[in-house]
Image: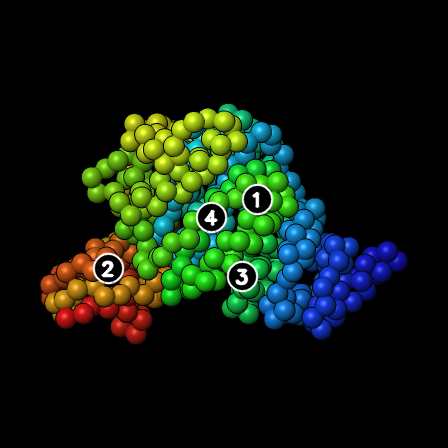
Amino acid sequence: MEEDRSAHIRAIKAIQKKLVGKKLTYREIYTLMDEIANDRLSDVLTTYFVAASFKEGFSTDELYYLTKAMVETGTKLEFRGIVADKHSTGGVAGTRTSLIIVPIIAEAGFIIPKTSSRAITSPAGTADVMEVFAKVTFTPSRIKKIVSEVGGCIVWGGHLGIAPADDAIIDVEEELSFESFDKVIVSIMAKKVAVSATHLVVDIPVGKTMKIRHFDDAEKISKKFKTLGRRFDMEVVTDINQSLEPAGNSVGPAFEAQDALYVLEQKKERPLALEAKALRLAGRLLDICFKTAKIKKNGEEEARQILVSGRALKKFQEIVKAQGGKGDISSANLKIASHGREIKSHKQGKVKNINNYNLNMIAKVLGAPIDKFAGVFLEKKLDEKVDKNEPLAIFFAKDKYKLKEAEVTLSSFPIYEIEA
């Protein structure tokens, strides 16, 4: 009891130290993360730490200490050999590349234990989309068994106890409506270190509705990811890209699942931007895995061959089956159980802008992600021509009242800007 009290006092002193702009030692940061992870630090004190960190930022050493302490105070999944992983700094819905990348990497011969989040502020997280096909909640031992059987998984990491201090800090940040760039880096890296990742590709979308809005910031973040990766003997490659709209055709769990299936099945109606992004990221990840494995292959060419040949689809079906879903999953038997309503353009012109904030809001009004079959299908994308009374989008919801509510909301929060 006396030791618990002593640790609590040390944690408070560490927060005070950070508030006046001083650097923290590993012992101080570990004590803080341990107190937060075990719910022994009040929300008020955690908020002070978050606010101080946002103002002052972290040194390179502090970033390393924070990541290490978050890992050490939580659950770890031990894998051996080359362990691949992928993550995005996020900011735009309807870009579900993980469901395409994971089976490609696993089929190429590298294990990829992908732990994913559920939606927090978006209409769907990767775990929500994968849950359309299969279970996503497993024990650590079951995850290891799935990965040993099929080479990869797409599971929810929220209940595993991986970097629990990070989850507590995220809760505070959501209330405050901000998250520092340094915290984004630590949050991602802690979860990757905890699953034994040795090779990581980080998708860094940049745009006015992304977490990262400027390319200068993206370059600095990329550098920090790579520096931190070296401290953990992790090969990190980043992909900085401009994102102005969803790469897929839809927003909402079942619709994003359908988009991913269309790409895996190589259907004519597949979203080509989503396919291109998934292949680019998979290729960059394979390049660094091949280099370590001393395999002379081009990553993106190999990724494309695995996708086009149908092997990625087969591997995805294996992963779905291993996670308790139907192994014969296809877009043909994915039934969208909801009502639809067309949203038409009030004028003729060209799509000048898609407001991703408003798109996310509308999808949530429709019921996503709790309702897996709620969402928005985008009939028109950027720079496409549109005639008056031509459909711009289709709203979907199980509840007809929510369709009406979303239409009313649209009048104040438009998704499309049409230039005459």
Per the image, the residue denoted by label 1 is 192
Q: Point out the tag, 4 or 2, that comes first from the N-terminus.
A: 4
Q: CA distance from mark 3 to mark 1?
A: 17 Å
User: Which quarter shows the N terminus?
Assistant: bottom right
Q: Point out the tag, 3 or 1, that comes first from the N-terminus.
A: 3
Q: Point out the tag, 1 or 2, that comes first from the N-terminus.
A: 1
Q: Point out the tag, 1 or 4, that comes first from the N-terminus.
A: 1
- Mark 3 vs mark 4, foreground winner is 4
Q: Is residue 93 above or below residue 14?
A: above
Residue 389 percent coordinates (x, y): 12, 64
Per the image, the residue denoted by label 4 is 238
- Mark 3 vs mark 1, foreground winner is 3
Residue 40 percent coordinates (x, y): 73, 59
Q: CA distance from mark 1 to mark 4?
A: 14 Å
Per the image, the residue denoted by label 3 is 181
- Mark 4 vs mark 2, foreground winner is 4
State left or right for residue 182 relative to residue 266.
right
Q: Point out the tag, 3 or 4, that comes first from the N-terminus.
A: 3
Q: CA distance from mark 3 to mark 4?
A: 15 Å
State left or right for residue 275 relative to residue 38.
left
**Residue 367 quadrant:** bottom left
Residue drawn at the location 31% of the way across and 42% of the way down: 275
Inspect the image, locate mark 1, and give the three-letter code of the amino acid beneath it.
Lys
Inspect the image, locate mark 4, and give the three-letter code of the amino acid beneath it.
Thr
Residue 226 percent coordinates (x, y): 55, 48
Q: Point out the tag, 3 or 2, that comes first from the N-terminus.
A: 3
Q: Secondary structure at mark 2?
A: loop
Q: Secondary structure at mark 4?
A: strand
Per the image, the residue denoted by label 2 is 382
Inspect the image, locate mark 2, and give the three-letter code of the amino acid beneath it.
Leu
Q: CA distance from mark 1 to mark 2?
A: 34 Å
Residues at badges 3 and 4 in contact (C-beta under 8 Å)?
Answer: no
